[in-house]
Amino acid sequence: MSQSWDPFSHSGSDAGPCLLAEPASLRSPTSAARLSMPLVVETTAVTVAAIAAVRFFHVHQPAGLGWLLIPCTLVVAALAPAWIARREFPRIGLRVEPILLALKTVLPACLCILPLLYLGLWLLISWGLPVPLRPVLTDQQSWFTWLLYQFLYVAAAEEVFFRGYIQANAMRLLRERRLSRPAQRWIAMAISAGCFALAHVAVQGQIVSILTFLPGLLMAWLFMRTRSLLAPILFHGLANVSYGIMAATLP
């Protein structure tokens, strides 16, 4: 049986719940240096390939299945390397305790962020500026199906990839550097949010998509805070739906 470890765990009483203990071999600097480079190469190659594939499906919509191929690509790109390398993948958090923690964390975040988002959109419209990234519904898509798509496909797939794969791997790599624990967390969060924003720019072809760095940073924090993917998935879906409704209903 392969050994795996929780990228969030640290030795000590404040480490919190972890999936499996860190292998003793990873505590050796020589062993860590040997293991770091393959993980860097893998994460970089998988990220570039996944974003390129998503961009292709977004532009060409093969057989009209781009809506399905894009989230499937992200989920496979996140899970396949972890399965091949037999690494532990971050949990979704579909149990009572993680669900309660996710709700207690996400609801205050929504109450703080969504009113500011509405105010920002209202100011843009008041100044005669266009609303960025306004959602577009196709003839075959209703508001209900769009809402389900935002949660079940967009939010879930993107969080599995950008938080579950990229951010978790960044934490694994940073654990072996001589950095403070807060520095490790913030760097991993910035890497995750940066990849999230750059992917949106590359796929959507709009420089304004770089603004997704800010919600990406918040979702990275939610992942770090709750140690499960449920909280960032919930916030991601709620933010997307709220933004879409605001952008469509504001005059």
Image (cartoon, grey):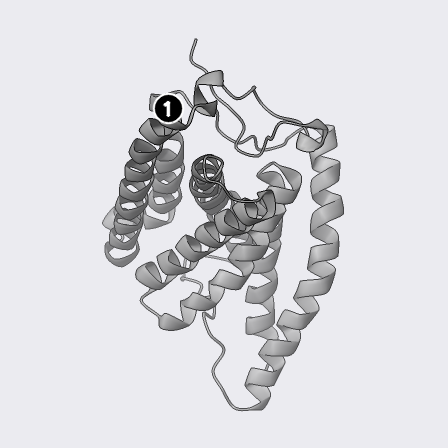
* Residue labelled with disc 1: 31
* Disc 1 packing (10 Å; few <14; some 14–19; many ≥20): few
Residue located 58% across and 23% down the image: 19
Against 153, residue 9 (above or below) is above
Instruction: Give the SS element for disc 1.
Output: helix
Residue nearest the observer in this picture, 49 or 38: 38
Drawn side of residue 83 relative to residue 227, left or right: left
Against 128, residue 199 (above or below) is above
Image location of residue 34, percent across then percent down: 32, 27
Against 4, residue 233 (above or below) is below
Identity of the residue furthest to the top in this view: 1
Residue located 52% across and 22% down the image: 22
Answer with the quarter of the image where residue 25 lies.
top left
Image location of residue 206, percent across then percent down: 35, 70
Drawn side of residue 182 relative to residue 16, left or right: left
Residue 237 visible, this orientation: no
Type of residue at label 1? Answer: Ser
Against 195, residue 206 (above or below) is below
Residue 211 visible, this orientation: yes
Residue nearest the observer in this picture, 207 or 62: 207
Which quarter of the rendering shows the N terminus?
A: top left
Image location of residue 17, percent across then percent down: 66, 27
Image location of residue 47, percent across then percent down: 32, 45
Drawn side of residue 167 relative to residue 227, left or right: left
